[in-house]
Amino acid sequence: MNLNFMSLKTTSVAAVKGERHKEKVLERQKAQELQQAMLSERELNPYWKDGGTGLPPEKDEETSVKKVTVVEDAGLSWLRKSYQRMKEQAEREKRNFEEIVAERYGSVEVFQSRLEEAEKAASKTENYHRSGRWKKTDYSESEKEKKERKEQHIEKAARDEDGKN
């Protein structure tokens, strides 16, 4: 018998998995390097420079909330619906209404101030739409003006004819 088979090198499953993991890590690094190389020094979007995501960083969430509340009625309908749901929740859970408002808004005063601001803003937009900008035109006045112009034109034409004769 020949003992050559004993001189063969053997590897464990763990060693093979470790090598595969190293290869994957190297491939990821190469892909990242290629992506970084594709970004040019002359990139115009400042958020792509220095390994950015391409999007601006998010600022305070409060500013985005303020933007959302200034829609048509300044969030008045939304706040009224929230008020109604808080009342229903208080009845359903047999809890104090002020506690539920405090959980959601911090305090009852904060909720009331938001509601008042929304009501003021909604009344401003309502008044704007009721103003003369959206007022129907009075066609009777324009008809009168048309009649006066026709009469003036006829009189002028009559004078011109008298002057020619």
Image (tube, rainbow, N blue to C red):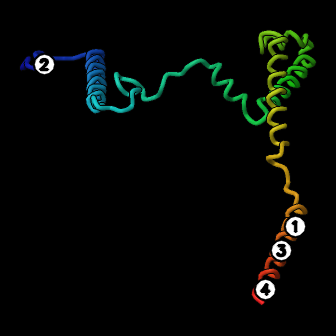
Residue 143, picture quadrant: bottom right
Farthest bottom residue? 165
Measure how far apart labels 2 and 1 are at the Cα level. 110 Å
The earlier-in-sequence mark between 3 and 4 is: 3
Residue visible at 27% across and 19% down in the picture: 22
Left or right: 83 with respect to 1? right
Chain-order first, disc 2 or disc 4: 2
Q: Tag 4, which secondary structure?
A: helix
**Residue occupied by mark 1:** 143
Q: Is residue 143 above or below residue 95?
A: below
Residue annotated with mark 3: 150
Determine whether the residue tagged by mark 2 lies in a helix, strand or loop.
loop
Q: Nearer the viewer, residue 45 or 96?
A: 45
Q: Residues within 10 Å of mark 3 (few under 14, many from 20)?
A: few
Q: Marks 4 and 1, Cα distance to the nearest angstrom? A: 27 Å
Q: Which type of secondary structure does the marked residue at label 1 adopt?
A: helix
**Residue 139 location, x and y as percent?**
87, 62
Task: Identify which amino acid the numbered label 2 is placed on.
Answer: Leu
Cα–Cα span, label 2 and label 4? 127 Å
Q: Which residue is mark 2?
A: 8
Position of 138 compared to 114: left or right?
Answer: right
